[in-house]
Image (cartoon, grey):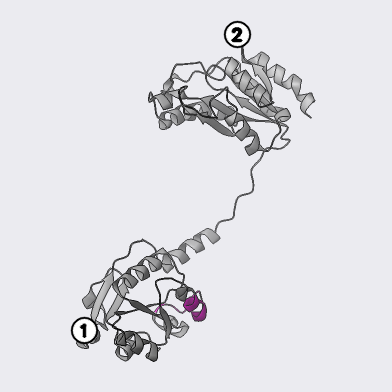
Amino acid sequence: MDTWVAAQKAEGRRIGFTCGSFDLLHAGHVQYLGAARELSDRLIVAVNSDASIFRYKSKLRPVVPERERMYVVAGLAAVDRVTLMEEDRPLTLLLRWKPDLYIKGGDYSTDALRSGDAVREYGGKVEVIRPGFETSTSKLIERIGALAAHVEPATAGPRDFRGLVLLDRDGTLIRNVPFLHDPAKVDMLPGVIDGLLKLQTAGLRLAIVTNQQGIGLGYYTVQDFIAVNQRLLRELGARGIRISKIYFCPHSMADECSCRKPATGMIIRAMRDFGVTPNQTFLVGDSEDDMRAGTDAGCQTVLVDAKGFEPAVQQVLSLMPAVQ
């Protein structure tokens, strides 16, 4: 290292020096080392030894052994040379190589660096780089500990999953209100609660596929749409009905998209998400666009007409033996 430093100085290059433990390398380290390299032509990084970290930081640190920490730091494009620092302070190395810049990252002032006076005495300069990320090795260790204390939940899924029912929303489940965006106007249609319970009891998963061109036209927002769905889901949930997913198309009729019914985009995506075949999928809706979308996707289609939701449910249940 001595020969290399002398050669860089002889060529007139500006040498920067910084140090640290770099225990768990994170974005803050990379940002700070990159900024340090921009201040200098060559950057030396002194990595604290395991023993020095044990002394000045914690008897439970470091997490990563010194050779591995040096290897990771040396792999950064901003770093030209890496050395091991056995002492707690960098003063000996600073006086040995007399770099042009002594650089540290943190919130303190240049006057707070204990080795700063020695650097200024030989004609060097002290620089402090402010942190660009609110992270640290200690915070990472704390988060890892918190995550490790939690048990990952089991995979959810209903028993006897026999098929998928894709339900149109407006005019099928709730009264059709043009450009509905007020949750107070959600009005469940007759027979829907009992009908959905029958479908669910029969082992069918339930999902919603709905065109919402009012979003694309600017009549209401996605947040308004979600608020209406929350009201609907609360009413259904109170009766034990589970809607697994809600697929929606926010585009207007003038937009070119693959999701707006009678296009099949939402239906194809739903079948893929649930891992079902068209033969295991029913589309229940109140319009010709619903029926065409389901047919083009290869699904069983059931129209909710003036007779209401209950006959549609009976039709789905009657078709189920064909999809076993």
Q: Which residue is mark 2?
A: 306
Residue 286 in sight = no
User: How packed is label 2: few (under 14 Cα within 10 Å), some, or many (20 or more)?
Assistant: few
User: How packed is label 1: few (under 14 Cα within 10 Å), some, or many (20 or more)?
Assistant: some
Please say if 263 is above or below 276.
Answer: above
Tell me the residue at 43%/74% (across/down): 22
Please say if 65 is above or below 145.
Answer: below
Q: Residue furthest top?
A: 306
Choose between 15 and 85: the one closer to the eye.
15
Q: Which residues are magenta?
A: 57-71
Three-letter code for the amino acid on which mark 2 is drawn: Ala
Tell me the residue at 43%/66% (across/down): 26
Q: Name the spot of residue 254 as percent of width and height, x first.
A: 45, 23
Choose between 48 and 255: the one closer to the eye.
255
Residue 57 in sight = yes
Tell me the residue at 34%/84% (across/down): 8
Q: Which residue is mark 1?
A: 120
Choose between 216 and 196: the one closer to the eye.
216
**Disc 2, SS:** loop
Q: Name the spot of residue 222 as percent of width and height, x first.
A: 43, 31
- The answer to whether residue 65 is magenta is yes
Three-letter code for the amino acid on which mark 1 is drawn: Arg
* Quadrant including the N terminus: bottom left
Q: Main secondary structure of the magenta part?
A: loop
Q: Name the spot of residue 145 as percent of width and height, x first.
A: 51, 63
**Disc 1, SS:** helix
